[in-house]
Amino acid sequence: MRLYWNAIAIMIALLVVTSVATADDDGDDGILGDAGEDLGTAAAWGLAFSTTIILWKPGLKYIRANADKFVEDERWLKKKLGKANRWYLKIHYWIGAGAVLVGFIHGVAMNKWEILFWGGWVGMLFMSITGSLLLWKWPPRKVKKGARLLHAQRAVMVITIILLYVSHEFFD
């Protein structure tokens, strides 16, 4: 049941992100012109890909738990799943960080300085910082535990997407 609700959440997020990414504005192109808008589209797609982890992780856990039902040699499948997971997570890290950077350049290029426009970016930055704390060996266990709890909060992602949607759809 949880996987079902996660699938619905990611589909809604993708619909919102694509509607923001494909929206056309009134001709105010900012500093970089159309390139500034294209950067926003790239950042939106980067955010959309980064949120696919909501489906990836539960799906991976399900397949690992039921590996014996899918193939005869479950060790082989689990080994391949571990390799795929490491590959996916590396892409998740880099695309997520890239989306934050490209989103910042987009915001500066579009020359919009209202707080609502930057609220969504701050949410993306927050998720990126807490995610990076999980990767480093330096933070103590308490910091990593708190970072994991904050990074995995769906509320942060939902608020970020809502702020991005409202600022781009209604105030752009």
Image (cartoon, helix red, strand yellow):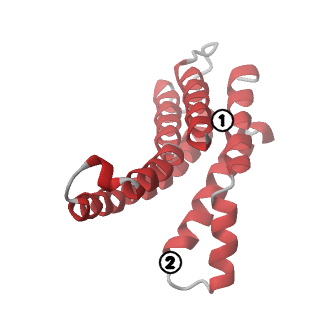
Element under label 1? loop
Q: Which of marks 2 and 1 is in front?
A: 2
Q: Residue at x 59, y 40 (%)?
A: 6
The foreground one among 52 and 59 is: 59
The foreground one among 88 and 93 is: 88
Q: Which corner quadrant of the image does residue 140 belong to?
A: bottom right
Q: Residues within 10 Å of mark 1 (few under 14, many from 20)?
A: some
Residue 18, image x and y in percent? 53, 24
Q: Residue at x 49, y 72 (%)?
A: 135
Q: Mark 2 points at which residue?
A: 136
Q: In this view, does 34 lie above or below 111?
A: above
Q: Earlier in the sequence, mark 2 or mark 1?
A: 1
Q: Residue at x 53, y 35 (%)?
A: 44
Residue 130, image x and y in percent? 62, 65
Whether residue 112 can be seen here: no
Whether residue 132 can be seen here: yes
Tell me the kind of residue under disc 2.
Answer: Trp
In the rendering, which numbered label is found on residue 111? Answer: 1
Q: Are marks 2 and 1 in contact (CB under 8 Å)?
A: no
Question: How far separated are the C-alphas under marks 2 and 1?
Answer: 34 Å
Tell me the kind of residue under disc 1.
Answer: Asn
Say how many tags the image has: 2
The foreground one among 93 and 64 is: 64
Q: Is residue 30 left or right of residue 74?
A: right
Q: In the displayed orientation, state which residue is furthest to the right.
A: 115
Q: How crowded is mark 2: few (under 14 residues within 10 Å), some or many (20 or more)?
A: few
